[in-house]
Image: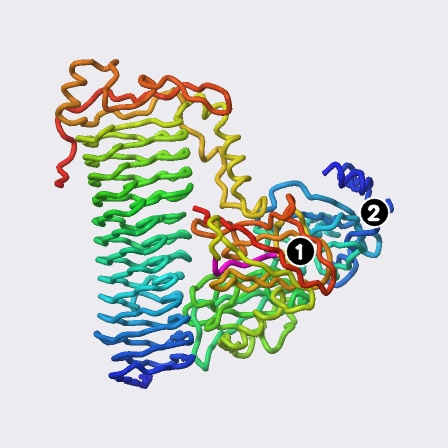
Amino acid sequence: MNNVFLKYPCLLLLLLGGLLSACTPENGSGLSGQLLFQDQPLATAQLEIYLKADKDRSVQPFAVTTTDAEGRYQVSLPEGSYFVIGKKRETTDDGRTRMLMAESPANPHQVADRIAPVASFNLREMGREGLPVADEKTGVAGLITYQGEPVSRSFIYIYTETDAGLIGPSYGEAVQADQNGRFTINLPVGRYSLVARKRADGSRSGALSPGDLNAAYPGNPVEIRSGEILALNTFALTRVDAEVHALRQAEGVFTKTETLLRGQVVDADDLPVSDVYVFAYLDSRMVGKPVHMSVPTGADGSFSLFLSDGGTYYIGARSAFGGPLEPGEWVGTFDGQADHSVTVTRGANDDLGTIIVKEFW
Amino acid sequence: MRFFLLIALTFFFTTPAAALVVDQDTVWDGQHSFSEDVQVLAGATLTVLPGSQLHFSGARLEVSGRLVAEGAEFSGENWEGLRLKGVDNTTRITDCVIKGAATGVFVLGGGPQLEGMILSANKVGMEVRGKAAGKVTRCRFTGNLKVGLFIKDDSTTSVVDCRFEGNLRYGVYLYHARPQMFQGNQFVNNDTGLMIAYHGTDPEVLDNRFEENTIAVQVDRAARPVLRGNLLLGNQTGFYIYRRSDPLLTGNRIEENGVGLLIAYSSYPEVESNDFMSNEIAVKLEFQSSSWEAKRGADARAGETSARSAFAGQGMRSVSEEDRRAKRLDGMVNAGDNWWGREGTLELASIGPDGNPSFIHDGRDQTTFVDEGEEYPLDKVAHSPWRKDPATEIER
């Protein structure tokens, strides 16, 4: 951490007094963007930078800055992965104190060697339970179906931002339909995008699997007006197709590129270990989402890890991705360097050798 | 009334099949082989008739609808096993054999009824997670390479009258799970019969038999189960209470084990109304010290978590030190009101409440141990008062 402060002296100032926006970083890496409220620039809002996702966030922000009169901000940060939150406490014209807040829908943001743009996002007014404030006569209602039949107990997710593609945990609210597939959700006046999902295991969150039901409402975004419960047309779900799912799995972090690390995952007896993912992080702490990951190793333990670009990556391997370690998982790191890093040039096809994993009980 | 199409497939020879989606009610009989995954979609029922033999090569059978199978065999090479995703209690698998899979049966949520099954030679016999309920009754888990039955993730699946034999690591592993019933099971010749691990894993383990396991029951990492009415016979170690675990051990018969009860690393179980009979050592303390716990316990656990983390900070679900704190640290482990066998009782009558029983290894036998160059006093076992008669009526 001392080295970070030497390299980024203004970061220390930021942590002490939130004055970073006024100082010039040596190499200009960080994040910039704009905070909004009801689609209007939000001045003097607080922008907080965290190293961990919401569920793990139990410490003070890594960095804090304030938006200018145009709602804009720029914060200097060392290379790494960051979670961005906007907040503003203010008093309304009628003397009421309210809290505005939202996470960047595109969290986490990767910072490399330049100022990376963060898409503008709207803060929302928070109620006592962290949900948007809404009155009982304003909202949306509908019926969830599959092949013409009502679908019981599916979840309807309300998104206020669409940049993340109506997936992931950036929704503002999730409500479960009743046994007959019907739902009513009270919402503040505004525009929302709705998605409904029913996972086969009944869970509220998590990656969809083949066979699950899923759909975005075809009339998105819907406009909610004061004093009106908007009655939607039938909201029909479709089944997640196995082939389409497999194709999508092959995209994203699995994307094949021209820059490649390969090797073999073995146990302490040098025997190959199958069904282990290999991950690449930009952040030396190796927390949060990896920037790239391999498909699971085969019977011979071999892996190919495709990278989007050259650079320094931190490499780890485990049986599962996401969530805490569980007993029975294989886990390990690339130990060619003490910090588990490897530096790759663009277009390289490098052999990492072996990654030794241990079974964790 | 909705009309269901019934497709009866009867084969008397092996039938190769490609990827298959079962989206309407279907009956299988005879022999089938699959080289691609089979999916039974929600709303559809797959019925597998007695005597059927289903063979999978590098594939799995995934059920989101309903599976009703009786007396069938599911096997294969390099196959993943059965995946039951959110199925309710109308999914019933009865008297079926599942062998050679990565995970014989994977239950994700829901509440299937699994009865009389044989799960053998899988990597994991059965894994239950996703807050699943349901029942596993009269099943046999034999020779699975890692775990016979793995219950996780706040699942409450009942485990009743099952037999776990010759599983290479664990017969049953309970991790953040609390079965509604865990009763009447037999554990024979496993490496560890029953593992109950991590804070929040607090089941009641009732009336089970543990015979000839390396470790009969291990309670680890701040788990706090109730272990009642069990027979532990001829194991190398009976109960192994490890790493700040505080279970209640009551009404158990602990007989002819190498060590009846091994307590290590700042664990303070309540041990009462048990029968300790003919063990080589009835109770043994190992690296167990109130002084060590007060001085080094929290730091050692923090270091352990860090060292074992996958990628620094992405480790196991953690438990706060507040949750782990011992109720008292007075250098004593309570083991009053137990029966120590006829010979033990005679010995205690002879040496009195302050004596040093030959069948207990504690701070009276080994005053200190060394950790990082520093000596710590080994705790002592409070064995008085003791019972004059057996506490249980458990039969061998």
Give the residue at mark 2.
Answer: A21
Mark 2, other Cα within 10 Å: few <14 / some 14–19 / many ≥20 = some
Q: In the image, residue B130 lies at what x, y percent?
A: 42, 57
Amino acid bearing label 2: Ser
The residue depicted at 65 percent of the width and 72 percent of the height is A221
Colour scheme? rainbow
Name the side, left or right, on which B305 lies relative to B213: right
Q: Quadrant of residue B350?
A: top left
Q: Is residue A316 visible?
A: yes
- Dot 1: chain letter: A
Name the side, left or right, on which B165 lies relative to A301: left
Amino acid bearing label 1: Pro
Q: Earlier in the sequence, mark 1 or mark 2?
A: 2
Q: What's the mark number on residue A108? A: 1
Magenta region: which residues?
A: A273-279
The residue depicted at 74 percent of the width and 36 percent of the height is A2
- Dot 2: chain letter: A
Q: In the image, residue B35 lies at what x, y percent?
A: 40, 76
B210 drawn magenta: no
Does residue B48 lie above or below B84 as drawn?
below
Q: Nearer the viewer, residue A144 or A27?
A: A27
Q: Nearer the viewer, residue A268 or B130?
A: A268
